[in-house]
Image: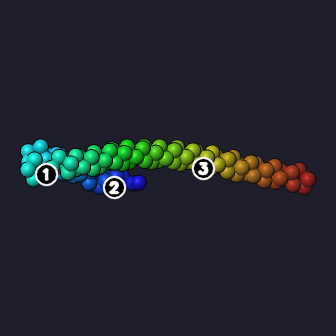
Amino acid sequence: MDVDTCEMDTNTCQMDIDKCEVDIDTCGMDNDTLDIDTCERVIDTCQMDIDKCEMDIDMCEMDTNTCEMDIATCEMDIDMYEMDIDMCEVDIDTCEMDIDTCEMDSDMCEWDIDT
């Protein structure tokens, strides 16, 4: 679940909780309109909505944490790769110097042979 979905779920959940609180208040005030059984069902449904919502929020937070850890790992990998590339470039430079030295040695050798 991504963060946007999570925020939408949290908002929906908050609306469910608000609706529930209104239903409970209405039920408490208006026993003529809503009988106690209906009221208890509303409260139970509401409690389930709240529980589901809390689980969604927890899941979302875990997903977000996992995501942040993945990003951190990724950033470390990138840093490692950049260091590897730097090391490689140093190796290439060393290699090129070795080749230059070799060519000079070869030239010296040929000069020695000629003389």
Q: Where is residue 12 in the image (x, y as percent from the top left)?
A: 26, 54
Please, which colouring scheme is shown?
Answer: rainbow
**Which numbered dot is residue 4?**
2
Disc 3 marks which residue? Answer: 85
**Mark 3: which secondary structure?**
helix
Disc 1 marks which residue? Answer: 34
Lower sequence index among marks 1 and 3:
1
| Residue 24 visible in rendering | yes
Q: How crowded is mark 2: few (under 14 residues within 10 Å), some or many (20 or more)?
A: few
Q: Which amino acid does label 2 sit on?
A: Asp
> Can you say which quadrant of the picture contains the N terminus?
bottom left
Q: Which of 81 and 21 is in front in this view?
A: 21
Q: Is residue 84 left or right of residue 108?
A: left
**Mark 1: which secondary structure?**
loop
Lower sequence index among marks 2 and 1:
2
| Residue at left offset 40%, top offset 46% | 59
Q: Is residue 27 left or right of residue 94?
A: left
Q: Where is residue 20 in the image (x, y as percent from the top left)?
A: 20, 48
Q: How many labels does the image show?
A: 3
| Residue at left offset 78%, top offset 53% | 103
Lower sequence index among marks 3 and 2:
2
Q: Nearer the viewer, mark 2 or mark 1?
A: 1
As measured in the structure, the alpha-carbon distance from the residue carrying label 1 to the one carrying label 3 is 72 Å
| Residue at left offset 70%, top offset 52% | 96
As measured in the structure, the alpha-carbon distance from the residue carrying label 2 to the one carrying label 1 is 37 Å
Q: Nearer the viewer, mark 1 or mark 3?
A: 1
Q: What residue type is labelled 1?
A: Leu
As measured in the structure, the alpha-carbon distance from the residue carrying label 3 to the one carrying label 2 is 36 Å
Q: Which amino acid does label 3 sit on?
A: Ile
Q: Position of residue 21 (x, y in %)?
A: 17, 46
Q: Where is residue 78 in the image (x, y as percent from the top left)?
A: 53, 48
